Amino acid sequence: MSLTTPAPSPTIAAARPAAAKKARQASRRAGVPYAFLAPGLLLFTLFLAAPIVYAGYLSLRKVKVSGLGLGAKSRTEVWAGFSNYVRSMTDPEFLPSVYRILGYGLIVVPTMLGLALLMALLLDANRTRPWIGSFTRIAIFLPYAVPAVVASLLWGFLYLPRVSPITDVLEAFGLTAPELLSSSWVLWAVANVAIWGGTGFNMIVIYTALKAVPTSLYESARIDGASELAIAWRIKIPIVMPSLVMTFVFSLIATLQVFAEPMTLKPLSNTISFTWTPLMKVYRDAFVRNDIYSAAATSVVIALATFLLSFGFLKLVGRRAFNQED
Amino acid sequence: MFKKIAPVLATLTAAALFTSACSSSDDKADDSATSNEKVALTYWSWAPNMDKVVEGWNSTHPNIQVTVNKQDGGDPAVTKLLTAIKAGSGAPDVMQAEYQKIPTLVSADALADIAKEAGSLKDKFPAAAWNSVTLGSDAVYGVPQDSGPLMFFYRSDVFDKNGLAAPKTWDDYAAAAEKIHKANPKQYIGTFSASDAGLFTGLAQQAGASWWGVNGDSWTVNINEPATQKVAAYWGGLVEKGVVDNKPMYTPEWNAALNDGSQVGWVSAVWAPGVLEGSAKDTKGKWKAATMPQWDAASPATGNWGGSATSVTTQSKHPKQAAEFVAWLNSDPAALKLLAGTANVYPAANDTTTILTTPPAFFADQADFYTIAADAAKATKPFTYGPNVNVAYSAFNDAFGKAAESKKAAAFTESLATVQKATVDDMKNSGFTVAG
């Protein structure tokens, strides 16, 4: 396939000036949208497309060492085919990490969205005293503003029996505190940090959707004899369904990419391994094992899985969730 | 149709040109330094107050000025260096490199051979330390800076109360562990930390293991071998009995336990006073240092935990001057004094007894602290690190984390097979020739 230049070459332009001028004008007009798109395209290319393509390229490469691998030039980069993918998928730690985040997702997503919805509905039900509402809203939202690493450190201190005030309180009542970072609790301990940090954000999204509902809807429902509970269940929840779908997809993506919380809690316990989640495995391969090639392969797999799950889910619920907008 | 695509392509081409313009490196002329040329060197180190040590060099060497760039620690510095080497620019001239990372760095072609400039320093260092910077070859990939011979630290008040002396052998240590925990179920003589592969490596080294080795043109990996198995079984037994804790070190929990007297001993290295001063400040004056418990009291041995060399990187444009600085920093008496006094490191060089006369502040009452340390340093067993120490260490963390959590002695010894397999598989996958 050969490409033509957008503007005719100078020799042709000299031969047919009128036609050339016309063509130049046309091409200038055609170029205008691209000029507007250029900054976006440039940034997209530099900071998204190029790294993705490079990651894809790296995932097909590997380093080949010759001999002892000690002298200079003993390492060469060679094509690896799909061997990085095979190695990454057959790693005995990979599937357990996938199952682990499935369990983690089953805890986090319903709890977090359930709490967010409940709090949004409660806030929305209280429209008479706005200052209580706005205070509560900010209070619930605030944990979202705490970086995940800081949140995990704070919770980590609360989880460790010897430094946790919770243990002191429980012991004052003669109870033994559970070891929250032991293997039976650790999944819940990590999930708790995510729920604590994420509920506020999702609550705001749902609450904003609720605010947009005209009050006349509720008034007519009340005239028809609907209780507050029935209004919430039959009117509010169906109306905010698109927001719920959106927050669900966000939460799903966040679950697949969970990293900061377990990584920060890792040094505090024996129970969080280097490959506790798939993204931690990527980190280990790239920065602990210095094998960016298999890290790239695992990243590509995670990206594809995220893409498939998010769009699969949107396709599944799309019609149901968005039918009000048709 | 092409008219529509062409401007996009033009944009993309512009982007490509832009990026390549940015990444084009400025290749300077080769290093033909004359003695009058002014040279600026950068030095990555994470030792405290290293800039003050370097002052001592800068003030006497106006033509070779060194700037210290403080690093977060051994692991992040290595990650940064390897990235810079891969990128082709951005590495410092001089770099602090932990002994166990040297084979990895040499294998990535990150460290320059300074045999010509520093080869004559061999006799100034213990054989084990020198071996770590030569990897048994004729090349010299750095000059040893500090070492971390293992020692045993204990709360003398608690030991006295229980009628115990510092354990001479590991059997003594086990007996003391049991006695202390029985007398006070909240007290432990120590913990088995699955997060500190470096300490376990030192313990295996003391027992006579050397996990990697070079045999002609191929590597050998011996992690799942009798000496290491003995160490793993020993600690697994103590954890299973419950007389030694199973929680990782360097956590807020562990700090609190040291400070409130729940942890009354620590198998650690010569640098422990600095850590204890931060973690267990309420217990100042109650600690004592001793030589390591032994497997065979007749032939005392110890291992190493930590310690590093100073190396010149392959990206340095002035390797000769850099090597000169490195040699001064780690062997000149004035520099050693600064290192020990200001940067608080235990110098690897042989004759430090004249420099280290007063014990560390946290052990102010123990006049013989550095005599014990010097004896320990001399008794350090040789150990060879391989090119994928990080793989072995991360496999250790995961496998022994599970074993420690299960509190089963059998799980400890089984974990060694996991670590061995992960290490060998990784080397074979990279194309190393691995024998056995």
Image: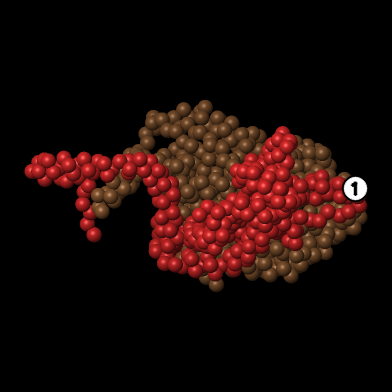
Which residue is at 64% across, 40% downward? A145
Which residue is at 78% across, 60% downward? B170
Q: Label 1: chain?
A: A
Instruction: Provide residue A61's location: percent of width, then percent of height.
Output: 42, 61
Residue B197 position (above or below residue B333): below
In the rendered structure, the answer to whether residue B380 lies left or right of residue B179 reads left
- Using the image as rendered, state which of residue B94 and residue B413 is in the foreground: B413
- Using the image as rendered, state which of residue B114 and residue A176 is in the foreground: A176
Query: For the residue marked with disc 1, what is the amino acid?
Result: Ala
- Using the image as rendered, state which of residue A69 and residue A175 is in the foreground: A175
Q: Colour of chain B?
A: brown
Instruction: Provide residue B28's location: percent of width, then percent of height.
Output: 34, 39
Give the chain coloured red. Answer: A
Q: Residue furthest left?
A: A15
Question: In the rendered image, which quarter contains the N terminus of chain A?
Answer: bottom left
- Using the image as rendered, state which of residue B224 and residue A224 is in the foreground: A224
Residue A251 position (above or below residue A10): below
Instruction: Provide residue B35's location: percent of width, then percent of height.
Output: 39, 32
Q: 10 Å neighbourhood of mark 1: few (<14), some, or many (≥20)?
A: few
Residue B69 position (above or below residue A323): above
Q: Is residue B303 visible?
A: no
In the rendered structure, the answer to whether residue A34 lies left or right of residue B433 reads left
Occupied quadrant, residue B391: bottom right
Which residue is at 63% across, 54% downward? A238
Instruction: Provide residue A46's location: percent of width, then percent of height.
Output: 40, 46
Which residue is at 80% across, 50% downward? A161
Q: Is residue A212 visible?
A: yes
Residue denoted by label 1? A172
